[in-house]
Amino acid sequence: MASVYKSLSKTNGHEKEGPANGVKKNKQRVLILSSRGITYRHRHLLNDIASLLPHSRKDAKLDTKSKLYQLNELAELYNCNNVFFFEARKGKDLYLWMSKAPNGPTVKMHMQNLHTMEELHFTGNCLKGSRPILSFDASFDKEPHLRVIKELFLHIFGVPKGARKAKPFIDHVMGFTLADGKIWIRNYQINETEPSKAIPSDTADAAPKKKSGKDKDKETEVALVEIGPRFVLTPIVIQEGSFGGPIIYENKEFVSPNQVRSEIRLKKAGRYNARAEQGVERLAKKGELGLRTSGGRKMKRDELDTAELFA
Amino acid sequence: MVTKGKLKMALAAEKGTDFKMLHLKKKEKVARKVKGKKGGGEGEVVNGNGNGNANGKKGEEEWEDVEEEVEGEDGSGSEEEVDGPMKIDFEGIDESDSDSSAGENDQNNESEEEDEEDIPMSDLEDLDDEEKEDIIPHQRLTINNTVALTAALKRIALPLSKLPFSEHQSVTTSEPVSIPDVSDDLNRELAFYAQSLSAVQEARKSLKAEVVPFTRPTDYFAEMVKADEHMAKIKAKLIDEAASKKASAEARKQRDLKKFGKQVQVAKLQERDKERKQTMEKIKVLKRKRQGADTEATNEADMFDVAVDDEIKDSKASRKDRQGPNKRAKKDEKFGFGGKKRFKKSGDAMSSGDLRGFSAKKMKGATGGAKQRPGKARRAGKR
């Protein structure tokens, strides 16, 4: 009964709020979880990200890797409209799924070069749960699939205004940059310092009243200090639904890490093959020149051969 | 590659058509195809399908015709099996999206491109290595359904233009960030930094305009992302790094100083030696002069002589003044250089007769240790 009342009152409240604002409110909640078989670094990265996102809900590892549509139910259970899912394969490859929970789209990306906050000894720090400024590269607006990815980043990494555990000040910025077909993500602290004393010195004799008025609009100098974590994402696939539905984008240039590894292995195997081939070739060449005792062409007997001369 | 219907496969098998050859030929004829597109009629195709027992060459031509037919948009019902999977229900999409006409074109182009360019890996396996190098294998077919992507975006997009900035806090750069070389760490990170910095400045301006608190007051304490222990660890690491750097610098300086100090020491010793020699010489000369003075007693000559002596000495000293490294000489003296090395260290009459190093005191064992304890009687007497 209570839940019914709660849901009713919630919807009522929402309706009331909707027309008053005139615009839809930015309401996001993110379900953060991973599959089984992630390494400690993946886990630490997940924790780092969860600590940066106060509007997130962390859940236990998902048992299955094939039935990802279960995530939709899980998200509904926790009232989340975004899913941020780490899928680990073979204990080394990490794939990141980002999805809008009830009905898509879903983006699958391959995560590389990941460094957690702990192993990067950066001096930056920020409030737990302060809302970040999201900085996007303009190339995100160029292609439709990148726009979808950007929107998902905006929903998942942008902390909504009224988030429960959010802090009221803004002290970090997240950068999303597209380079080399990959998305590079950085997290910086905003370090504000008073501007150097050189300029205020000539106005120092001005009245203190004026100074206090000036303080408000005086721009402090901004510098950034990196906080971490760092990682690079390669988009692979975009699905229309949430963990299902038709594939509406597939990255042709993505090479799976399995293939890379197998190629390296093949190359190594090729070294032996090439050497063995060379040996056979050399033998054949010797045979052709008649330099072998058995097989190959016999050399013509020379007139000046010792055996001929002293026969 | 070979995506024909069953009937056509059978037909091809009967004729013994080589699909690879056909594919190559098809590529050659792309240019011609464009011209002949309008001319390519439907009747020909039907004709081609009907003529089962044509000879090889004619069969090939027919196949080309079929391909043309597929390329041309006006595929008839009989060809449905060929272009069925490629075709998309554009009518349905037309209604959903305004810019679908552009999307439709994209779709067509792309499906054609897939036909032409993408070569599955299975076809490449029987090629030589040399040939393989030239071809860029596209394992997967490109899927880029622009229409569906824009539809999906539209469904989830936040109305950024309507929302106040403080709702979303996202900034997009005005120009794409260009990173010429991704593996150049420094410049890449600089580009990222610059992008974020510009975003911060822009965001701060608009947040100030909306009167949203931006800067954290210094007396506002709350839980941080990195806990105090973590920050302490970072600090310790920084200090460690600085200390090790300083220590290494110090050690280097010390090493240099030691090297230099030795030289100074040697120079000083030499200087002292020379001085002593000089004074001894002077004393000798003076003694001689005194002895001579008793008989002759000529002061002026005396002084004159000394002056000359000094002059000569000075000039000699100045020539001798340069101190080359005498390490070699010392080593030669110690270890020997040239000549016979045998028996050099063994004693001889001279060495056994040399009593310079002998000291009776040392021989008696009083080597300056603790003072010897007096005898019992003496000790008792002292009390």
Image: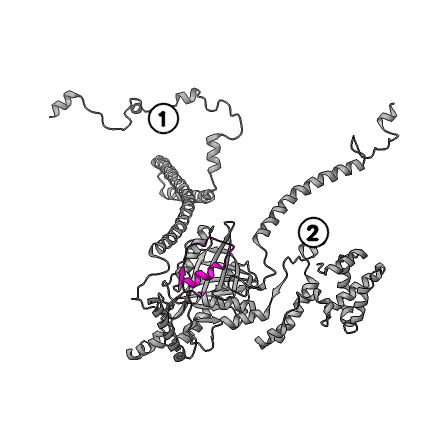
Residue A235 at x, y percent in the picture: 55, 61
Q: In the displayed structure, does residue B189 sit left or right of residue A297?
A: left
Q: Amino acid at mark 2?
A: Glu
Describe the element under mark 1 as helix, strand or loop. Answer: loop
Tell me if residue B110 is in the magenta stretch. Answer: no
Q: Is residue A9 above or below residue B58?
A: below
In this rendered view, identify the residue nearer to me: B158 or B307: B158
In this rendered view, identify the residue nearer to me: B190 or A253: A253
Label 2: few (<14), some (14–19) or many (≥20) C-alpha neighbours in 10 Å: few
Q: Amino acid at mark 1?
A: Gly
Q: Magenta segment range?
A: A56-81
Q: In the displayed structure, does residue A192 sit left or right of residue B49?
A: left
Q: Residue at x 51, y 31 (%)?
A: B337
Q: Contact, CB < 8 Å: mark 1 with mark 2?
A: no
Q: Are marks 1 and 2 on the same chain?
A: yes
Residue B311's disc number: none
Q: In the displayed structure, does residue B18 sit left or right of residue A233?
A: right
Q: Chain of mark 1?
A: B
Q: Which numbered disc flags the more N-terminal residue, 1 or 2?
A: 2
Q: Chain of mark 2?
A: B
Q: Which residue is mark 1?
A: B357
Q: Which residue is mark 2?
A: B125
Residue A122 at x, y percent in the picture: 41, 57
Distance from Cα at disc 1 to Cα at disc 2 = 92 Å
**Is residue A168 in sight in this rendering?**
no
In this rendered view, identify the residue nearer to me: B254 or A144: A144
In this rendered view, identify the residue nearer to me: A169 or B383: A169
Which image quadrant for residue B375?
top left
Quadrant housing the C terminus of chain A = top right
